[in-house]
């Protein structure tokens, strides 16, 4: 547990961050890669099949290995890091805006509205699994907590966690009482063969369905957002060397609880990929609630090894992609939709798990190179500069 003194920082300790922390940019870049690897698996199938694709007698050993690696290490492990950093970033934004004496509430509202409208456009016209609009909705609930003291944040997190757990067990109970036909193959998807209009019609339907379902996940995402806010306020991630004891506790909890949950998740995903499984749908909501602890363990591992030469090199390598996350996130969708959808190259029906993973790795490596080139000439990514200009009403410098 954190001591009483640590939970009551003085106001002088909340001066806005003046220099970027490269390791936080690198963590954001790492999350972008994991999100891409997971998302690309369902780019072509939409909501018509398992999230990581189906497995059958034609699946190669590479496909099987890729499936298991992603199910254990990546699925539902990287979106919590991304959400955590959203909450972290919102607190830094709130601090800076207040420090500069602007209308903090109005600036925050413009930031959220821009994110939401961009996300809706992204979800309808490019990638149905958009996360930006969903985070914008969650950010509405986050606003009143950005000025809260640490103890208040902990109480708020507890309340949201109780709500998230109640919803998870309610979904588990409901799923357990539903029958599943294990012999039905997934319905054919229009994405790999359709025209842009046909794909957009299906994409709108899938995006609408996911957005409705997300309403039940707001409490869970709020817990993660608030964890990011609390971490930014306490300096746990900005100054990890001062908080090794804290990160050791996080690492232990993540390994003891998060890893077994991820093993169970991978096993259930494996079963569901061969044939539809009622067991999978029953336990999914509960495991989804626990697996973010493995994400916390990943962040703890970064914090605890940040001083090593290898980690320093990795941070410098990943940081450029994480400095322009909005640009890279949207670019991933544009590239993958062009490669996989019928109105582009139409390779969605040709690539299995290993091929899709190779596509994700190729896209991300290219983004690291392009991000480094771009940031050598500009202060931020193009979408980040536009976002800042909309929020502040002036050209980003």
Image (cartoon, helix red, strand yellow):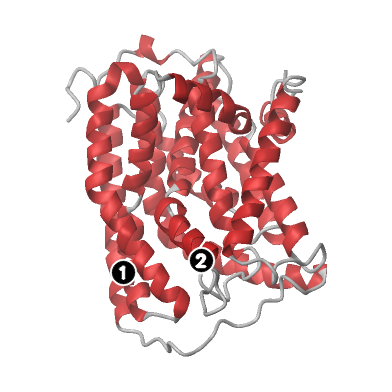
Q: Dot 2 corresponds to which residue?
A: 61
What residue is rendered at 28% in x and 43% in y? 254
Secondary element type, mark 2: helix
Q: Locate the N terminus by quadrant.
A: top left
Residue 393 in sight in this render: no
> Mark 2 or mark 1, which is nearer the start of the sequence?
2
Residue 313 coordinates in the image, percent (x, y): 52, 23
Local packing at callout 1 (Cα closer than 10 Å; few below 14, some 14-19, many 20+) is many
- In the picture, residue 385 is in which quadrant? top right
Q: Locate the C terminus by quadrant.
A: top right
Residue 23 coordinates in the image, percent (x, y): 48, 25
What residue is rendered at 68% in x and 48% in y? 332
Q: Are marks 1 and 2 in contact (CB under 8 Å)?
A: no
Secondary element type, mark 1: helix
Q: Closer to the camera, 115 or 54?
A: 54
Q: Nearer the viewer, mark 1 or mark 2?
A: 2
**How many numbered markers are drawn?**
2
Residue 283's tag is 1
Residue 140 coordinates in the image, percent (x, y): 49, 44
Residue 131 vs residue 147: left or right? right
What residue is rendered at 52% in x and 27% in y? 314
């Amino acid at each position: 547990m954190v001591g009483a003194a640590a939970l009551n920082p003085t106001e002088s300790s909340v001066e806005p961050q003046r220099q970027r922390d490269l390791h936080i940019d690198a963590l954001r870049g790492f999350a972008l890669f994991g999100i891409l690897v997971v998302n690309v698996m369902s780019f072509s199938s939409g909501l018509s099949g398992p999230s990581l694709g189906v497995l059958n007698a034609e699946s190669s050993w590479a496909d099987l290995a890729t499936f298991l690696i992603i199910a254990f290490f990546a699925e539902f492990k990287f979106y919590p890091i991304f959400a955590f950093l959203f909450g972290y970033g919102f607190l830094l934004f709130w601090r800076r805006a207040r420090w500069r004496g602007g209308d903090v509430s109005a600036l925050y509202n413009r930031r959220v509205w821009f994110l939401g409208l961009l996300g809706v456009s992204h979800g309808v016209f490019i990638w149905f699994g958009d996360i930006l609009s969903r985070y914008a909705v969650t950010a509405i609930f986050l606003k009143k907590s950005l000025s809260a003291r640490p103890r208040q944040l902990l109480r708020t997190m507890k309340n949201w966690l109780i709500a998230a757990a109640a919803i998870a067990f309610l979904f588990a109970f409901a799923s357990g009482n539903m029958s599943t036909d294990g012999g039905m193959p997934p319905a054919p998807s229009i994405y790999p063969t359709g025209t842009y209009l046909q794909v957009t019609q299906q994409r709108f339907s899938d995006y609408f369905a996911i957005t409705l379902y997300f309403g039940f996940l707001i409490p869970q995402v709020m817990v993660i957002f608030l964890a990011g806010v609390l971490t930014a306020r306490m300096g746990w991630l900005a100054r990890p060397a001062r908080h090794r004891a804290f990160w050791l506790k996080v690492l232990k909890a993540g390994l003891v609880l998060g890893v077994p949950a991820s093993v169970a998740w991978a096993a259930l995903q494996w079963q569901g990929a061969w044939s539809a499984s009622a067991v999978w749908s029953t336990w999914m909501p509960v495991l989804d609630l626990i697996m973010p602890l493995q994400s916390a363990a990943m962040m703890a591992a970064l914090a605890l090894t940040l001083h090593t030469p290898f980690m320093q090199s990795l941070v410098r390598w990943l940081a450029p992609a994480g400095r322009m996350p909005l640009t890279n996130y949207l670019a991933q969708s544009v590239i993958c939709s062009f490669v996989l959808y019928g109105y582009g190259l139409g390779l969605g029906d040709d690539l299995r798990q290993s091929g899709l993973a190779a596509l994700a790795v190729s896209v991300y490596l290219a983004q690291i190179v392009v991000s480094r080139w771009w940031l050598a000439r500009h202060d931020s990514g193009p979408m980040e500069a536009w976002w800042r200009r909309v929020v502040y009403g002036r050209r980003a410098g």
